[in-house]
């Protein structure tokens, strides 16, 4: 897709703000599901510009979240991510260094890859007590109590239940929500309530600040690149911020595009629990919440049926066939729900 003159001018201004003067070329990068990406070819080397989606029904400041998280991590010496260079909040454009490499194909995530992801999370959180970390906002849909985790599901199900039956495929999705997802939510609500009682957890009690983490959010290998030397770079932090480590685990092991084998879950969860004030209890809490994240990702897969989600996909991928895309998402949602409640 050609780059319009206004975008070219805005990227030129960001290059100047980053001290990169001289001629440059722009080329669209395919693959993003939420935003538009541009490769910036400059004499100083390739860079990366990101145009962030915004919608009245989805007012999250994706640029502020990503740029703030990346700037904090880069300033602390973390290098497994692109360096943030400049941003234009009015036009919602960020400029970053270009991370070389390619995405891992599905089915190829191994122990080395999982170790790299864990190391990235640990490296960022090594600095979570730094005063500048307090400036970072809560992550998107951040959860700081069991009630928060349950509330996320309730809100997502309400939005899905309100979708309009625009066509036969929408009607199939509505039937799936009512006949399968709602009963699954009731089962998991009881599961978590009973588990909280066994662990002597008050569902409304906030997670201690010492047990919260800085989360890349939407963390997984769909948002990672590996170069020819085997080095990983992690990208896309538009939902990042303070959150519950249980949510990091639930999201990481529920990703659909490049799934992480569950054989790696125990060691990954043990590593995150080791940094908590009560590792044993937190480890059990992680396990308690994991099925709920299968249901959350079932909801996420149906976002394409909602106006804001549909608009976001069209913004990022204007050439994709809407019907084919939605049918594929509904099939994936059915498979994910079977993982939540077998």
Image (tube, grey):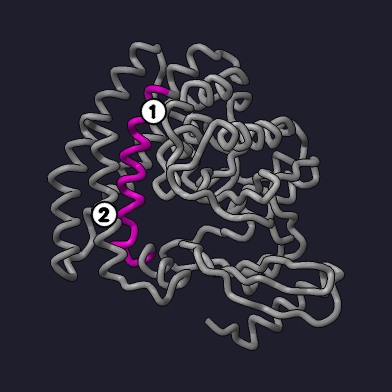
Residue sitting at x 36%, y 39%:
151
In this rendering, is residue 288 above or below 17?
above
Would residue 10 be found to the left or right of residue 117 on screen?
right
Using the image, tell me which numbered label, if any, was put on residue 223.
none
In this rendering, is residue 149 above or below 16?
above
Residue matched to label 1: 289
Residue matched to label 2: 160
In this rendering, is residue 251 above or below 55?
above
Residue sitting at x 19%, y 49%:
177
Image quadrant where one finds the C terminus: top left
**Could you tell me residue 267's position as x and y percent?**
52, 21
Query: In front: 109, or 26?
Result: 109
View extreme (bottom): residue: 5
Badge 1 marks a residue whose secondary structure is helix
Taking the magenta stretch, the answer to whether it contains residue 293 is yes
**Could you tell me residue 335's position as x and y percent?**
26, 43
Would residue 266 be found to the left or right of residue 43 on screen?
left
Residue sitting at x 58%, y 37%:
113
């Amino acid at each position: 897709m050609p780059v319009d003159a206004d975008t070219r001018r805005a990227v030129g201004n960001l290059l100047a703000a980053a001290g990169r003067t001289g001629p440059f070329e722009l080329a669209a990068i395919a693959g993003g599901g939420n935003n538009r990406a541009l490769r910036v070819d400059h004499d100083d080397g390739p860079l990366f510009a990101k145009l962030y989606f915004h919608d009245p029904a989805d007012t999250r400041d994706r640029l502020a979240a990503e740029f703030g998280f990346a700037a904090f991590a880069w300033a602390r010496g973390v290098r497994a991510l692109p360096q943030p260079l400049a941003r234009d909040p009015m036009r919602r454009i960020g400029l970053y260094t270009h991370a070389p490499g390619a995405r891992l194909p599905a089915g190829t995530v191994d122990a080395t890859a999982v170790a790299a992801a864990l190391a990235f999370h640990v490296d960022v959180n090594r600095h979570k007590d730094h005063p500048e970390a307090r400036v970072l906002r809560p992550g998107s849909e951040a959860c700081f109590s069991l009630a928060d985790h349950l509330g996320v599901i309730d809100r997502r199900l309400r939005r899905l239940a309100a979708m309009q039956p625009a066509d036969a495929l929408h009607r199939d999705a509505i039937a799936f929500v009512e006949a399968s997802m709602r009963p699954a939510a009731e089962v998991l609500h009881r599961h978590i309530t009973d588990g909280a009682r066994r662990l002597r957890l008050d569902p409304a009690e906030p997670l201690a600040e010492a047990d919260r983490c800085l989360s890349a959010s939407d963390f997984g290998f769909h948002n990672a690149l590996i170069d020819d030397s085997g080095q990983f770079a992690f990208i896309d932090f538009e939902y990042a911020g303070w959150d519950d480590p249980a949510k990091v685990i639930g999201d990481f092991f529920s990703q659909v595009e490049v799934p992480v084998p569950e054989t790696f879950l125990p060691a990954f969860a043990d590593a995150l629990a080791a940094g908590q004030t009560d590792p044993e209890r937190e480890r059990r809490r992680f396990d308690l919440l994991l099925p709920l994240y299968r249901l959350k990702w079932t909801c996420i897969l149906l976002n394409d049926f909602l106006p804001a989600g549909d608009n976001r996909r069209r913004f990022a991928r204007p050439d994709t066939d809407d019907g084919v895309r939605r049918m594929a998402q509904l099939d994936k949602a059915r498979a994910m729900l079977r993982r939540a409640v077998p």
